[in-house]
Amino acid sequence: MQIEGLDEMDNRILEVIADNARMSYSDIGEKVGLSRVAVKKRMDQMEKNGVIKGYRTEISAEKVPESIPFYLDIETDPQLTDEVLDQLARDSVIRRLYLVSGNCRIHAEGLAPNRNTLQVYTRYLYRSQKGVLKLNCSIILSTLKDLDGGIEYVQRHLEQEHLEEGGGTAGAH
């Protein structure tokens, strides 16, 4: 992964922490050839510039028993878009919200504990939330590429699981 506008060392640091953001500055420094202090200074600067937005636990929705990862595409009444956004921001099943191009459109990513909850939630949004004109819900079946986890991150793990289940050789495309 190379991000334009960053020097090679910052890109190397980002590659190292992409797999494990909990590494110590010393361990990162060992991998990229810098001191702990130099790594901390560079990472602090990337945080200040907004390149690194934060460190979080990424929950694999596909591994949570019975959970349903989903996307919502919502078209709203222009005068009520903020009200719809406020409601979505308060809903615990919604993980990410985006205002997207188009006629007052919102894209939301969520994780419902089960199908029934998702069905009740989407029905409530469409029928009861003022301002929702159209709502499309898509259930995520599988993640095929995740740049935040590295371009080969998901594929590598899928291949490993396949091998562990006795499915043959990895890497055959």
Image (tube, grey):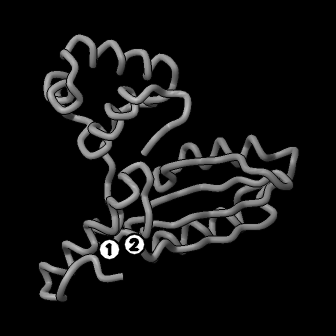
Residue 22 higher or lower than 96, as above or below: above
In the shown orientation, is residue 40 left or right of residue 5?
Answer: left
The residue that mark 2 highlights is 114
Q: Nearer the viewer, residue 161 or 27?
A: 27
Query: For the point 44% across and 22% down, which residue is it?
Result: 46
Q: Where residue 43 appears, x then y in whole percent?
A: 35, 21
Q: Specify the quadrant of the image occupied by residue 61.
A: bottom left
Mark seen at residue 42: none
Residue 113 higher or lower than 36, as above or below: below
**Label 2: which secondary element:** loop
The residues bearing labels 2 and 1 have C-alpha atoms spaced at a distance of 6 Å
Q: Nearer the viewer, residue 146 or 128?
A: 146
Residue 41 higher or lower than 70, as above or below: above
Kind of residue at badge 2:
Asn
In the shown orientation, is residue 172 left or right of residue 138?
Answer: left
In the shown orientation, is residue 128 left or right of residue 159?
Answer: right
Kind of residue at badge 1:
Glu
Query: For the point 39% across and 27% down, which residue is it?
Result: 10
Q: Where residue 70 appears, x then y in whole percent?
A: 51, 67
Query: For the point 50% across and 37% down, which residue is it?
Result: 3
> CB under 8 Å between callouts 2 and 1?
yes
Q: Where residue 9 appears, x then y in whole percent?
A: 35, 26
The residue that mark 1 highlights is 66
